[in-house]
Amino acid sequence: MATKAEFLDAIRSTTNHDEFKELHWTGSFGEYLDLVIGNPDVVRTAHQRVYDMIMSFGTEQITIGKRAVTKYNFFSDPLGDGEDAIFGLETMLSQFVDCFKAAAYGYGVEKRVLLLHGPVGSSKSTIVRLIKRGLEHYSRQPEGALYAFGWKVEEDGKEVFVPDPMHDEPLRLLPPEARARILDSLNSDRGDRYRLRVEGEASPVSRYYMKQLLAEYDGELDKVLEHIVVRRLVLSERDRVGIGTFQPKDEKNQDSTELTGDINYRKLAEYGSESDPRAFNFDGEFNIANRGVIEFIEVLKLDVAFLYDLLGASQEHNIKPKKFAQTYIDEVIIGHTNEPEYRKLMGNEMMEAFRDRTVKIDVPYNLRLENEIKIYEKDFRQDKVVKHIAPHTVEVAAMWAILTRLKESKGGQLSLLDKLKLYNGQSLERFTEENIKELREENPREGLEGISPRYIQDKISNALVRDYSSTCVNPFMVLNELEEGLKHHSLITSEELRQQYRKLLALAKEEYADILKNEVQRAIAADEEQIQRLCSNYIDNVKAYTQKEKVRNPYTGQEEEPDERLMRAIEEKIDVRDGAKDDFRREIMNYIGALAIEGKNFDYRMNPRLQRALEKKLFEDQKDSIKLTSLVSSVVDRDTQEKIDVIKSRLIKNFGYNEESATDALNYVASIFARGDVKSKD
Ligand SMILES: Nc1ncnc2c1ncn2[C@@H]1O[C@H](COP(=O)(O)OP(=O)(O)O)[C@@H](O)[C@H]1O
Ligand SMILES: [Mg+2]
């Protein structure tokens, strides 16, 4: 434990005075103009700012199934705190970013509701949360800075400060001609960047003061602007500044003032008129989200009246509270909806209007295993949970999740498991990445149905807390939880589907057994010295073979023909056909030759395929001597026990098992061998 002084030190060192000063900058209107000239980007619209925020994290070009896609780093844990990251979905995300780009350029998308649509648990909320948190962060950076203003005015003989209630852009105060002149100049050398725009009118409160003061100063705007204090604006959802969220409640409790603000009755008494903007609370969600983002959770569950508010807000950038002046807003409107909800409303007349004013972006489930695994690894990393998680636990659950999302292909020459592997980037014999595109087009709904990540997360977490009086959670335990849960899964509507999912669980279990068998084999064969020996033996023979020489037998000292049987026994383990053996051998020799030129030695680990082949061969040679099957019987002789202990420690050291999960794994594989149902390919 640290001392108090150390704690205080830690506190002090995390306080940043310079940053505090920056973020609390205030100045006159004139000083603000200096800032604008120095960095015109401070006047960006909300859409432009979000677009730049995303771009500020950089991009990468990747290919998915032979198609080039831009990957936006922003969606991969942008704040580096491991909180939010989207795995996969690159195609959808690049479509999403394109919306912001088009909106930044003013191509019309800035007048639409962005609607994320997809099955439950497809990361819609996560994507919006990322945008919101990203924008909060960006607004604190120098390159993301934006400004708001307030009025220094006299009231009842006292000087008071009245902040603009919409924390609006100061330039919005200017009359159209002045604004146009400034913007023209700011836009004069932007090259192919989007043009800056400051549209709409200032808030009713600011218009009120503007009118009052103009009258007072006989129309001299300069004098009026001397009442303006500009300040740096930091967006914060918690402080309800620039980031809003709206969630539909039950219909009776919904009130549109929550969105567009309300009359302040206490102040109404003071000011006497309902239309006096000083007697209005600009605290609706649309108001507070000005300059940033508003999120509509389950947007289609909103009352129809609200939907019309929403459409006006997006189309005209105006909100219209009851009995009050309309108010301009500049904010990104993102809604999300689950797929069943959307389909239910498809035929509805209201939806017609809604669809016309939204840009719908489908957020599917992952279909790529490696990405699905990352989702769960993020939550169940070993350093986050107390229990040991046996290797492949998350992988097997993820595999099942993907299987439930895949559709059988026409013709049926591709099993679901093979399809999963193909989508995961593995080449199969008759299918390649080229086929992925066709397969995806054959089933456009693939990825919009199936089991959600949330279900998997819940079941893994169940397995972790369930007391199996065990130190670890293994794939079987998770598969059991997954199966149990199917009985009362609310989204499974038919017995048929349930049966189908059960079958897929069995499939995942089978695949797991295969993986496990492989791993135990490798552990048995993982004696480095032995592999090394086998490897040099193999290489000696391959060398002699390719150079048409003889090999010297180390025991007899005689020159012999290369040992074809040995070479083939190894090569067959990784499916090198007889016709391809020459190529395979030459390739290895070339590689070794190239290494030699650099003065390096060959190590079998440099060639994973060869390594695998050597391991398999060694395993085959040792299988009988180890008597793995005797593990399942209760009496084990000392010699066998010793060998088993060695294997176990290799499983622990090289493959990430703990004592118990290694024992489980060995027992399970032993039982497979005992049953004798080992596939011929092993
Ligand atoms: N592609 C993905 N990448 C990262 N996490 C994901 C992905 N898909 C789903 N998740 C995770 O699944 C859970 C549900 O996601 P959520 O955003 O609440 O979904 P939705 O709003 O679509 O119902 C979250 O924990 C989320 O992080
Ligand atoms: Mg959600």
Image (tube, helix red, strand yellow):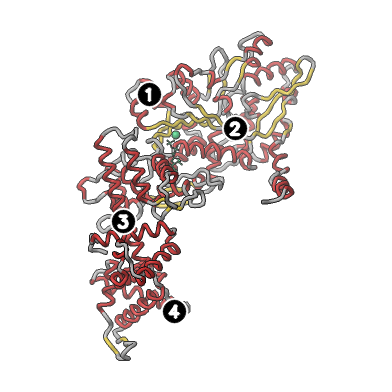
Q: In which quarter of the image is the C terminus?
A: bottom left
State if disc 4 and disc 2 touch (CB < 8 Å): no
Residue ID at (38%, 66%): 523
Please, what is the three-letter code of the amino acid marked with disc 2? Arg
State if disc 3 and disc 4 touch (CB < 8 Å): no
Ligand 2 within 8 angstroms of badge 2 C-beta = no
Q: Residues within 10 Å of mark 4 (few under 14, many from 20)?
A: few
Mark 4 vs mark 1, CA separation in Å: 70 Å
Q: Which of marks 4 and 3 is in front?
A: 3
Ligand 2 within 8 angstroms of badge 1 C-beta = no
State if disc 3 and disc 1 touch (CB < 8 Å): no
Q: In this view, does 8 lie to the left or right of 473?
A: right
Which residue has dot 4 on it? 596
Seen in the picture, residue 355 relative to 551 is either above or below; the reply is above
For marks 4 and 1, the one nearer the N-term is 1
Q: Where is residue 190 in the image (x, y as percent from the top left)?
A: 58, 41
Q: In which quarter of the image is residue 52?
A: top right
Q: Residues within 10 Å of mark 1 (few under 14, many from 20)?
A: some
For marks 2 and 4, the one nearer the N-term is 2
Q: Nearer the viewer, residue 58 or 189?
A: 58
Which residue has dot 3 on it? 513
